[in-house]
Amino acid sequence: MRAEAPNRASDRPVLMCHSALARARFGPVVSVALSRPTARIEPLPCGVPSFYFETDAAEPCPIALGGPGDVLVYFLSLAFSTRYGSLHPLSQLALLLRGDLKIDLVPLTTFADRDVEVEADQVELDRVWQDAAPLLATLDGVTTALASADERIALLTEDAPDLAARLGDLQRMAAWAAARNARVRMTFEL
């Protein structure tokens, strides 16, 4: 969304960008006009993150995600950010999976941005290649946990209804790659 609100210092508009999908998943964005009682709100084209699964198998993976992969990008990013104190429900889900359920999330949080701007970005992109088998083991544990009747998991995932389905898709992709002793790479694009 684009919300124009005057800035007291310069009376220039302040622009905020939030995709409709992010608002649907994580709640509305409230904008406040600082010097006048109303703000003009109009759509601003905002990209939805894209998720990519690559393999070094001889043939391309025939399995695709059954829907948008943005929820995977959000979950992987928030699972990674637990080390920085994130309190988002999907971060709390990652803490529950890792702590109480003892699921190793390292293979799932090994991913990178596809946008290479400097040499270090390419180094990171090359570093995130991993064997498919450990990723499959992680996804087996995570999808089993999400399919359980654990009320804590249901509460933490209620704003991400497609998460279990997309993780199931990713699990099938990882199983396909593991059956071929392939390495895989998970990346995203904003």
Image (tube, grey):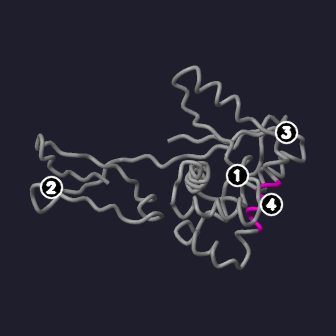
Amino acid under label 2? Leu
Residue 24, placed above or below residue 148: above
Asked whether the beta carbons under mark 4 and mark 2 sit within 8 Å of each other, the answer is no
Q: Are marks 3 and 2 in contact (CB under 8 Å)?
A: no
Q: Which residues are magenta?
A: 137-144
Disc number for residue 170: none
Q: Earlier in the sequence, mark 3 or mark 2?
A: 2
Question: Distance between the Cα atoms at labels 1 and 3?
Answer: 17 Å
Does residue 135 appear left or right of residue 39 in this picture? Answer: right
CA gap, disc 3 to disc 2?
55 Å
Write down the quadrant of residue 148 in the picture.
bottom right
Q: Earlier in the sequence, mark 4 or mark 1?
A: 1
Where does residue 52 sit, x and y in percent of width and height?
64, 43
Which residue is tagged 1? 64
Crowding at label 3, few (<14), some or many (≥20) Cα neighbours within 10 Å? some
Q: Residue at x 32, y 54 (%)?
A: 1
- Report how far apart the C-alphas of labels 1 and 2 lie in the structure: 46 Å
Q: Secondary structure at mark 1?
A: loop
In the rendered structure, which disc, 1 or 3, sits on the residue that comes first in sequence? 1
Q: Nearer the viewer, mark 3 or mark 2?
A: 2
Check the image and report above or below for 182 versus 70: above
Please name the amino acid that badge 3 sits on: Ala
The question of residue 139 being in magenta is answered with yes
In this view of the protein, which residue sits in the foreground, 144 or 162? Answer: 144
User: For the residue labelled by badge 4, is the local secondary structure a helix, a strand or a loop?
Assistant: helix
Q: Which residue is mark 2?
A: 34
Q: Which residue is mark 3?
A: 182
Disc 4: which residue? 140
Label 4 close to label 3 by CB (< 8 Å): no
User: Comparing marks 1 and 3, which lies closer to the viewer?
Assistant: 3
Q: CA distance from mark 4 to mark 1?
A: 18 Å
Q: From the viewer's perspective, is the residue at label 4 or at label 3 nearer? A: 4
